[in-house]
Each structure stands twice: as structure tokens, then as C-alpha cells.
Image (spheres, helix red, strand yellow):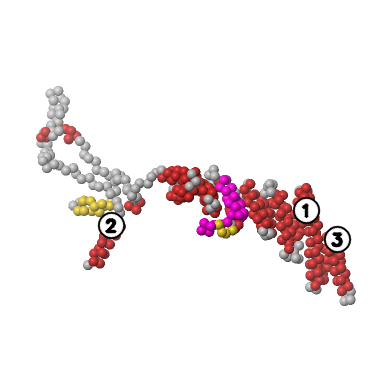
Amino acid sequence: MRSLAVWLAVFVILGLTAAPAWAVWVWRDGRWQWVEETEPQPSAAPERPESAPPPIEPTPGSGPRQTPDGGEDIPVLPHGTRTAEREQPAPEVPGPAAKASPKRPWWKRWWRQEDSNADRTLFGEGKEAYLSGRHRKAERSFKSLIKRYPGSAYRAEAMWLRSESLFTRKEYYKAFEQYEELIAQYAGSPHYCEALEREIEIAERYLGPARRRVLGVPMLSGETEALEILRRVYEHQPTGDLAEACLVRIADYYWDKQAWQEAEDYYDRYCREHPNGRRIVHAELRRAKSTIEKCHGVRYDTTSLALAYDRLRQFQQKYPEKAQGEGVAELLGQLQERQAESLYEIAAYYHRAGRPLAAAYYAERVQQRFADSPWSKNAANLLEQMSLKKEPNQ
């Protein structure tokens, strides 16, 4: 019996829950019916008091009487019925268009009405806490406003102040995320450029002594995050001073780490996209030097050496004073020596491999292009050895 009672209670609760909140029981057509409140209710005929006598039909011949002057007199009303009651129009029955305004469903109703100025109140509380130095309280108020009121007029300013509060507390990565949200959602905000500059400042701090926090404790290096932040700033604004600063800063970072290939790529990107930039001299010189430095790997590849030589010669022609101060002439001489050495090593390799025609070709190139180099004499000795070796066979 207990289980049966429990099941009955469950079914009753489910039935009441599933029923729409705007439905009611109505006595209609002699029985109770379950209808919605928004449906038009049939207008009931006005009840007559039991004491009122039934209406009496007018007798034949009754009607307006003729006056002696030929006009009509006041019509005769049966049994003293008043004229005002007879002339009153019948009550109108509401049609389908005269429906009551729909009510909110029960799942959208709240126990108390939401304040229309709640976002303004939250913003005021957060700004007051921010100005008084209570940053955590300010951040909680701003975060609540940002999450609960996506269409608020105070939302963009709340994002900015929350970012600034996090930056002040040295929560740099959380501040960066909030700056990014502001930049992505409010491109027309007056704080747009300021937010980009703040992101560059965060990247500089991570490239410096600042560390990523783990459970509130600064522990990990933030160099990877710093490079990603600089790339994001460049994507937001690929032209202008901020873009130039980002490209050069990334290239300088790889230069300091002796990652020559990455450094050359970013310096070259700067030279191509900002040929008249403020750091163009710095970028062109380091691009050429990066090309030289990365030639230590492959011994017999002279392509990079030739490219570095051409870049240095162009730099010397465009900026002669700067080239003289940087010792570009000495670098060009070193590059010629290294190119001559590479060509000679190629000739010697083919000589050892038993391919005399290829060895002679590269040895002659050394003599033609670098006649004043010591490697030209080595190439001449190699050609002489090859000729002496060939004579006995003849």
C-alpha cells in the first residue's frame, strides 16, 4: 500500500508539473473543463434577479400615438418599463481578437523582479572599489557585470577596468585574456589601442624577469607566452608602429637566442612589409648577419653565402656611413674567402669521388671568381694533380 501511494503521488506531481502554468479549470457547458487562460471565455448571459417580472410582449395596436398636431408622441412602453433601459445596447461578446495578454511560463518566472539598473549598480560598486584600491572586489563586480549583462552599456568599460586591476596585481596572463576579449568584442572602444599597448608591455615583462604564476606563485618562464602575445598583437594590427615593434622584438629575441633561421625570417618579413620603417637599417643588417651565421651547418652549400654577400653589398650601397661603422667591408672580405673555400671543397670532393670533370669545373670557378684568394692557388694545385694523373693513362 505504501508503494502504491508513493506511485500515485509521483503521477499526480508529474501531471501537475507537465501541465502548463497558464491553464485553469472552468465550468463550461454543464461540466468542468481544463482550458488555458489565454482562450476567450464565453460571456455568460446577464442573470435576471428572481424578483424581476418576465418581459411582457407589446399588445397589438400599441406603439407611437398620434398627437393632435399630427406628430408622434412618446411610444407607449409596456407595464411602465423605463426608456433608458430599453435603449441600452446589448453587451458585446468578446471575439477571438480580444484575448488576454499571454503570461510568462512558470520556468521563466522569478521570485523577485530583476532590477533594471542592476548593471549600473554593479559598475558603480566595481569602480568605487577599483578607485579605493580594493582590486579583488572590483574584479568580482566587473566579472559579474560582464557575464550577466552582455548588452549593457557599461560592459566595455568594465572589461577595461578589470584588465587594469589584474595588471596592477601582476596577474599578467589573466589581464591579457581580458584585454583580448575587449579587443575582439569592442573594436571601436576608445581603449582599443591602449589595450594593444598593454599587451606588448605584458610580453616585455614576460621576456624580462616576470614569471608565469602557478597557484598564485610565479614559477614558470613566460617567454613562449610573450612571443604568442606579440604575434596576436601583430594579427590585430598588421600595419603601423605597433606591428613594426612586434616584428622587430620577435626577431631580436631569436637573435639573442642564436636561432638564426627564425631571426632571419622575421627580419626579412620586416624588410618586405615595412621597407620605410624606422628600424629598417637595423633589420637589414641583422638579416644579412643571420644569413651568414646559419651557414655553419651545411659545408658544401654556397647559396646562403651568396645571398648574404648580395645583402651586405646592397646595405653598403644604401647606407655607406652605417656600413663603415659596422665593418661591412671586412664582412664582405670574409664572405669571399668562405665562398672560395666552399667551392674548393666541392672540387676536392668530386676529385676524391673519381669524377674529374666536375672537380675541374669547380676548381676553375675558384680561379675565375676569387683569383686573389689563397684558395685559388689550392685550386690550381688540384688541377695540376689531375693533369699529372691523366698523362700516364694517355
- Give the amino acid at mark 1: Val
380 inside magenta stretch: no
Q: Which residue is mark 3?
A: 371
Mark nearer the N terminus (1 vs 2):
2
- Give the amino acid at mark 3: Ala
Q: Nearer the viewer, residue 37 or 349?
A: 349
Q: Residues within 10 Å of mark 1 (few under 14, many from 20)?
A: some
Left or right of 261 on screen, residue 182: left
Identity of the residue drawn at 29% across and 48% down: 38
Mark nearer the N terminus (2 vs 3):
2
Secondary structure found at label 3: loop
Q: Which quadrant holds the C terminus?
A: bottom right
194 inside magenta stretch: yes
Secondary structure found at label 1: helix
Estimate the x, y position of residue 43 in percent, counting from the top left.
Answer: 22, 45
Q: Which residue is mark 2?
A: 16
84 w.r.t. 110: above or below:
above
Mark nearer the N terminus (3 vs 1):
1
Q: Are marks 1 and 2 in contact (CB under 8 Å)?
A: no
Let me know if residue 179 appears in the view.
no
